[in-house]
Amino acid sequence: MKSCQVETTSLRIAIQKSGRLTDKTINLLENIGLKFDGYKDRLLVKSLNFDVELLLIRDDDIPEYVQDGICDLGIVGANVSLERGADVEVIRDLQYGMCRLSVAVPKSSGFHTMHDLNNKRIATSYPNLTRKYFSSRGIDVKIVEISGAVEIAPRLDVADAIVDLVSSGGTLKTNGLQELEVILHSQSQLIRTRKPIPAEKLDLIDKFLIRINGRQLAERSRYIMMNAPRESLEVISGLIPSLKSPTILPLAEPDMIAIHSVIPTDKFWEVMEELKAAGASGIVMLPVESMIV
């Protein structure tokens, strides 16, 4: 792609204009404090309260725009970046848009192993990943590239099997297909250009990542409060898998204390019964909006 870049001091982030990641991406940006005055009918949208602008484009174009330095960052599915083969840096997974790229066959086809597909037609919107995967397995296939509605290709006798994105598997079942093998697991990722970035933009990226870090950590954490006998403090403190030492507050009853802490959500349910057995009562768990550690 030839650069058509307009120089800007704002941090420019490419996101999907319309698709399965769009709403969740906008939600993420709003949850880290960025405000936008409408975005659905515009190509370039500037934040009202942070020096960042969004470029809303087709998800297939995001990796190349970031690769060429037209955008500093991009938010896109790993499946798209890998299919496009763009030379970008993956900064981190964003924990949404989970899916898998799978080989699927008609239930009535009699195909039970990957080698049953030797010399068969495979319909897909991911020709590069599909070709690479089958080649790595030593299986010769004919790739039939389709831009949409891949799941109906076998019913139309366009292909013998498909390679497509799967989330719940409902679309496959509706079309009489079943998964044969998973090629890769995918989710949304934050990617960055390898082109030189001015110092002022690097500073903006650091600030942006602090917000992303805080939001991701908060989503995995919960704020807990409980009352407990003062004599149980040492035992309870040892049970709480917190990031820092818990906050201890006195209560009206001199032999009782309140304990506040932030813990990983998945760990809370593992230790709840132990906390109760150690004397904790009135245990309350609350969501955390953001965290800076």
Image: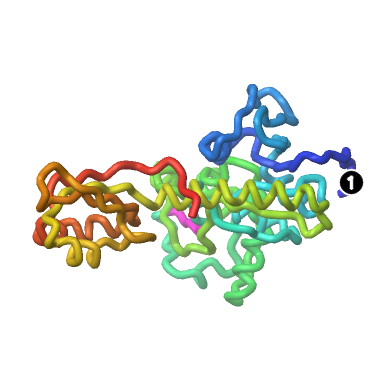
Q: Is residue 133 above or below residue 281?
A: below
> Residue 123: in sight, yes or no?
no
Q: Is residue 192 above or below residue 118?
A: above
Residue in the image at 33% along x and 60% along y: 245
Q: Position of residue 106 (x, y in %)?
A: 44, 53
Kindly report the secondary structure that dominates the magenta region of the rendered protein: strand
In depth, the one of 171 and 194 nearer the eye is 194
In depth, the one of 34 and 78 nearer the eye is 34
The residue at the far bottom in this view is 138
Q: Secondary structure at mark 1?
A: loop
Residues drawn in magenta: 101-106
Residue in the image at 48% along x and 63% along y: 182
Q: Position of residue 99 (x, y in %)?
A: 49, 52
Q: Position of residue 138 (x, y in %)?
A: 61, 77
- Amino acid type indicated by mark 1: Ser
Residue in the image at 46% along x and 48% along y: 291
